[in-house]
Image: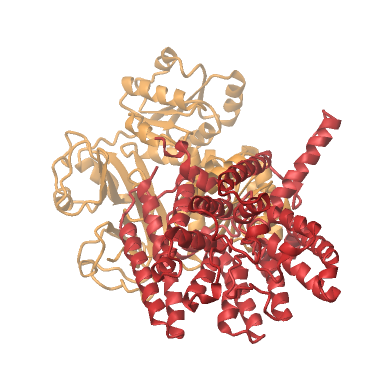
Chain colours: A red, B orange
Amino acid sequence: MNYKVILHTLGSVLNIEAACMALPAICALCYKDTESFIIYLLSALLCLIVGVALSLIKPKRTTMYSKEGFVTVALAWIIISLFGAVPFFVSGYIPNFIDAFFETVSGFTTTGASILTDVEALPRAHLFWRSFTHWIGGMGVLVFLVALLPLSGGSNVHLLRAESTGPSVSKLVPKIRSSAKILYLIYMGLTLIEIILLYLDGIGAFSAITLAFGTAGTGGFGVLNTSIADYSPYVQITITVFMTLFGIDFTIYYLILTRRMRDALRSDEYKVYLGIILVSALIISINCRQLFPDFGTSLRHGFFQTASIITTTGYSTVNFDLWPALSKTILVALMFIGACAGSTGGGIKVSRILILLKSIRKEIKIAAHPNSTHKISMNGKTIESETVRTVSVYIAVFLVLFAVSMLIISLDNYDFTTNFTAVAATINNIGPGLGLVGPAENFSMFSALSKIVLSLDMLIGRLEIFPILMLVSPYTWKR
Amino acid sequence: MNIIVVGCGNVGKKIVEMLCLEKEHNITVVDTRTLPINTLVNQFDVMGVLGSGTSLDTLTDAGVRDADILIAVTASDEINLLTCLIARKSGHCQTIARVRNPEYGKEIHLFKEDLGLAMVINPERAAAAVIARNLRFPAAINIDTFAKGRVEILKFQIPEDSVLNNMKVANIVGKLGCDVLVCGVERENETFIPHGDFTLLANDYISVLAPLKTEAVFFKKAGIKLGKVKNTIIVGGGETAVYLAKLLNESGIDVKIIERDKKRCDELCELLPKTTIIHADGTDNRQLLEEGIENTSSFVSLTNIDEENILLSMFARTVTDGKLITKINRIAYDDVINKLDLGTTICPKNITAENIVQFVRSKRNSMGSNIETMHRILNGNAEALEFRIKENSPVANIPLHSLNISKSALVACIHRNGKIIIPRGSDAMMSNDTVVVVTTATGVNDITDILD
């Protein structure tokens, strides 16, 4: 294990976080909030001091292997969450550090699960920071680092791979740095368009920016206690469209931008993803018809909630906990499916579900005709049996971790729906669940132990299990 | 530049490794096997595309439309040629193909233009050329050429009885009276770029830059035996041996090829009328002694098995003082191999890769950068680069001692209108000169990069 290169990279990550903290400080200045300004300035300084100290460590060998890549990513996410929690804790708005940590992890992992009962009581700088963590976490800090700094050699692909989502991560262009830059440019571009469209409604620059950050990272932290319910239908529809867009593989946008429409059309995943949204939203809208004055409203809420859950954003326009059982069940199923691989969304990912279903079909065919040969294909290409195997393992490990987390948090003695959806909503990076953690409620009632478990679930979900598992596995640390 | 490498075998890997060092290329690798692609993608900053180079879909995925150069180095000549043809028709790239079948080799000039091939490389022929160059100058372990062949960097070991032993680098020109420059010294595991007060010792491996004409004089005065090669024994009658024998016959060196396969011997007889072909097992030391290995002035082991070649050369060393050349296919372990006394080692795959990379560089020159040639010297620890000085270059017309040149770099030679100048402090580079710079720093792309 090359400790020096890991520490050096962590230092660079903290320096970036320090730079990010300057933004809420500027926000505080805009609203003449000196107290928040000082808090964010000091937090940024703290980050910078530790960051610079760490980045002064000069590794002898700069190559990073798979092992170092995973460990760096896992540690980086834990450390940025620890430092990101400092402003909440110091300002006294979240007096308990574990709560503050939970809130920040929820931000960076783009979960959007909160322990705050009254969001509106927070100063704007804090609200801004909460939403901004979504934006940073959505595409990933290390992707940003790779785009920004000329790191050594080609071994950085391990960093990118550990942080990006989906069963197989490939680069857009030959150079890793250009790939990372392209991803961030698309991300920034889409976010900017959304900010402008939201601003046109007249909800004010602050709301437009924070809501766009929450959508872009598929996070879900709002600035009002009622999430998105109090905004105009125009805002709700805009957010629905953008949530859906941010849940699509960014490679598709790159292919469209470079006018490779044929390649863009070849991909199956986003078609299935859009299909699922369409069908689920229609069923829910019909199912909830009675709850709303007209079918149009029902459709709007149906689509909003479907998009919000499948992209794992977690915004809400209505309290869907009060919806009929069928709609709620569909929403819970969507939680697990998640968005497309290579997007900012969480969950198991549509491509993994597709591969799993196709391999089930293959197994059934083999059972019927034992000597027949089958290949699983997606996007017009055969999928390596290695990838199929990792997908099966991924889902198996996912279920085991899910069960273990549920066991631990049931120590708090809440009902089954609450526990089940609390874990589902955190491990899939959604935010609100059902029951006591429903859209109108929050996570504050859980014990410290449960909050730590749920925080870990969020990290596990965002980093797709293995980086965190590698961090605690003895095989990683054996010489 | 956008470069596509089709075929991720040893040569493909070596090319990628060398091109990646330059950091400015966008490289995509194509192979039909997953494993070699994964290895390359994990090790270097390249993109991998799975598929055959002969499929237009695969090449499109690899970005053939925007590619500047496509290099086809799969194991099959036909696939390489077809890949280049398809790439040429669907994009605007220059193509390079590895073609090793000698039957194609003869006709290649006929279809080179039709296929739009910019370069065709035959690894065996390239290796034979390098071996022949080494046999013409047996005292040197390694020879790299610059300035269109007017200057060479020769690597050799200082013998105990040489006058170079205990001599300061600054005194060489004065004492030996010939204009050469010591541009690198390897002592045990360390590498130096020596300055004037550096003292040379016996058994150092030194790399000397010398104009072609002064080489012989220098070696004579330095007390190094020239040992001109009059005859050679080649073990293993593969394609390399054929090319080599032809080259050596042309320069009047007697060649004896020992080949174990009777049928191949007959073929060789037809191909090489001037060469003595001996049907015998080259790995049998009695047969080697019978064929006069003790009296030969050079010995080349060219069998297809590395271990055999190594053993043959080690045996030859025990019975003869002649020049030894050992072919080694395996690229890894070169540190270990260099410690053995095998004379000059030749790796055809490395030579192929180096030739291709040089072609890529020369292409890049027309696109802005100005490296003319580049060789890795001192066991790969340093680079010898040849630059062209542009009009209005900031280094032009300033005496070298007034330029703030980095300690890790050395201006070794100036080539001006066909004249070779070994520069001293008061000399200056002028526009349109080409200069050879030796440096241990990597990523030097322009002459200004060597300034501190």
Asked if one can make out residue B24 in the rendered structure from this viewpoint, the answer is: no
- Compared across the picture, whether B434 is left or right of A116 comes to left
Q: Position of residue A186 (x, y in %)?
A: 60, 69
Q: Residue at x 34, y 66 (%)?
A: A46
Name the image quarter holding the N terminus of chain A: top left
Going 29% across and 66% down the picture, which residue do you hit? Answer: B451
For the residue pair A140 and B392, the one nearer the viewer reads as A140
Point out residue B378 in the picture as x, y percentages from the top left corner.
32, 45
Residue B251 to residue A161: above or below: above
User: In the current view of this chain or complex, which residue is farthest to the front?
Assistant: A413
Q: Is residue B252 left or right of residue A456?
A: left
Classify residue B254 as left or right of residue B42. Answer: left
Residue A437 x %, y %: 63, 59
Q: Nearer the viewer, residue B110 or A248?
A: A248
Q: Is residue A129 left or right of residue A260?
A: left
From the top left corner, tell me how far across and down residue A395 is, in percent.
66, 44
Residue furthest out toward the top: B286
User: Is residue A184 in view from this perspective?
Assistant: yes
**In the image, is residue B236 above or below residue A416?**
above
Near-viewer residue (B138 or B53): B53
| Viewer-side residue, B313 vs A412 | A412
Where is the C terminus of chain A found, in terms of image quarters? top left
Q: B444 above or below B340?
A: below
